[in-house]
Amino acid sequence: MQKFPKKENEISAILIMGVSGGAILPPIIGKITDMTQNQSMGIITILIVWLYMVWLTKKIA
């Protein structure tokens, strides 16, 4: 936050999304894996969320 003091709210929002995603995403990944009978789909879900977080980070910086 010291690097981008004018973007404190946006940075805080990304941190909150990361923490809440860590609580919400595992059950969703489990359901997707169970429905598709394919663990690769769970990994793809993680990849999609990760790419979204990277996009948000680039948008802020």
Image: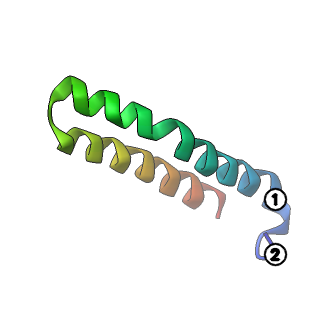
What residue does disc 1 label?
Answer: 8
Q: Residues within 10 Å of mark 2 (few under 14, many from 20)?
A: few
Q: Residue at x 43, y 40 (%)?
A: 26
Q: Position of residue 18 (x, y in %)?
A: 59, 50
Residue 53 versus residue 45 in the image, above or below: below
Outermost residue on the top side: it is 35
What's the residue type where badge 2 is placed? Answer: Gln
Q: Residues within 10 Å of mark 1 (few under 14, many from 20)?
A: few
Q: CA distance from mark 2 to mark 1?
A: 9 Å
What residue does disc 2 label?
Answer: 2
Residue 37 versus residue 47 in the image, above or below: above
Q: Position of residue 33 (x, y in %)?
A: 24, 33
Q: Residue at x 84, y 68 (%)?
A: 5
Instruction: Check disc 1 and report its element: helix, strand or loop.
Output: helix
What's the residue type where badge 1 is placed? Answer: Glu
Q: Position of residue 36 (x, y in %)?
A: 18, 27
